[in-house]
Image (cartoon, rainbow, N blue to C red):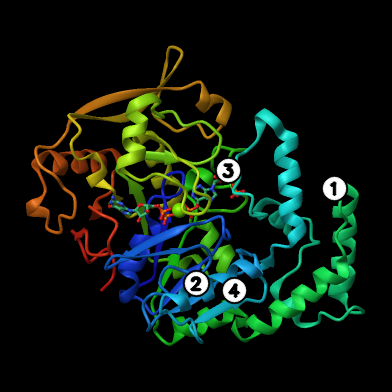
Amino acid sequence: MNLAVLGAQWGDEGKGKVVDLLAPRFSVVARYQGGHNAGHTVHVSGQKFVLHLIPSGILHPEITCVIGNGTVIDLDALLSEVEMLASLGIEVGDRLRISNNAHVIMPYHRDIELLAEARRGERKIGTTSRGIGPAYEDKIGRRGIRIGDLVDCSETGALAGIVRENVAARNRLISGAAMDWKVVLAQLAVSWERLSGWVTDSSLWLARARQAGQAILFEGAQGALLDIDHGTFPYVTSSNATVGGVCTGLGVPPSAIDRVLGVVKAYTTRVGEGPLPTELSGSSGDRLRESGQEYGASTGRPRRCGWFDAVAMRYAVRLNGIDALAVTKLDVLDGLKEIQVCTAYRKGSELLHDFPADSVVLASCEPVYETLPGWSWLTEGVQREEALPPEALAYVARLEELAGVPAVILSTGSDRIDTIFRDNEILGR
Ligand code: GDP
Ligand code: IMO
Ligand code: MG
């Protein structure tokens, strides 16, 4: 059985924790989109790991990790991550496969993104400044550089011609110190030396793994509402974070995806700009941010916080064909007297039950709340369903009802062990 684990909100739902937790049931964990804009946190026995590009299965020594063609790769960030893991006792060794067709985030992509954001002024996206958008723009514009192109970094080769043109375009756009294409090319050659052993035709590699009966976990980055096609455009990332990205971003057929697990926080957060109907300002928002430690795993930016948005969740369930949910951070709601859940939006005199992905329409929507009681004792660190307060179970039951799918994992803390499994059948072995 192969399982896709993806974000069903605006990212940072706890995908890293859930992937790490489920990884031992699989042989392979594969990332299909995004880049080091992602920050996936895993806590194991008091040690914290933040993965940006390398799939969150890497902590398990028997797992092979794949970075698919749909991703964009900053070579320095990737190599630093390998080093970071080694310093924490995790050897990547030969457990990594990188698609030869994944695109490279070049140093000029970051410069171009900073300029674009500055030019947008008030209308800025609030990106992670990692060069993600411009790298995908070059891919779609058919001037991007793929990992496999680095095999020939000579100054007379085909790659040199593309680097030269792209650097010249960057220098025309950006005033100040000019970038030297030969230096850029030489840096690519150094990186290639270090990572070429991991580069392969990952679609073929995955097909062979499947033939050999190996089970694959597909790890999403970002979340459904940040999807380039279905998210709150233009306040989105530049890739398909929804389930279609698995097929295009790894070169696997739809039949390779047996189940889809959507990860949701027990409330809502968002980093960067764009509409967030249930956003709480003032002390209520601060309360969630502080007890949930809602600061970006990649950029450290404070996350915007709000109540759970069931309209957005239903949209994510529909887009992805989510079979079941993992509900994380229940413990963050500990101690609240009352908890609100948004069940519909009000737009003028209209009541909306379906999520309007248009960000202008969404920005004009007011949440319609249902109030549920908070719980009588703490859920933090609870590992058995029987030990959860009845109000917490009722809260989860209401989310299941609103989603139309069961919540099969409940998470009550950041550590691997702070978890309740409710239905193992949906999740494979
Ligand atoms: P991802 O991007 O979806 O992998 O999520 P992030 O790692 O960016 O953000 C989730 C944060 O919540 C991380 O700091 C996790 O360690 C933490 N976390 C995950 N699950 C829980 C939980 O159930 N309770 C608490 N308190 N923290 C959690
Ligand atoms: P994980 O995988 C939360 C947001 C940025 C910005 C928008 C576009 O950890 O859930 P980009 O740099 O991708 O062009 O920025 O998307 N964003 C994320 N928000 N979690 C993430 O990843 C994100 N990756 C990008 O904040 O609003
Ligand atoms: Mg994150």
- Is the residue indicated by label 3 positioned so its CB lies within 8 Å of ligand 2? yes
Amino acid type indicated by mark 2: Met
Proximity of marks 1 and 3: CB atoms separated by less than 8 Å: no
Spatial separation of the CA atoms under disc 2 and disc 1: 33 Å
Q: Nearer the viewer, mark 4 or mark 3?
A: 4
From the image, tell me which residue sits under label 3. Answer: 236
- Residue 367 lies, with reference to residue 416, above or below; the image says above
Which tag, 2 or 4, sits closer to the chain's start? 4
- Residue 174 is labelled as 1
CA distance separating discs 1 and 3: 25 Å
Residue 77, placed above or below residue 364? below
Identify the mark nearer the N-term, 4 or 3.
Answer: 4
Camera-side mark, 1 or 3: 1
Pinpoint residue 51: horizontal percent, then vertical percent: 47, 64
Q: Are marks 2 and 4 in contact (CB under 8 Å)?
A: no
What's under tag 3, amino acid-wise? Answer: Val
The label shown at residue 84 is 2
Mark 3, Cα crowd under 10 Å, few <14 / some 14-19 / many 20+, is many
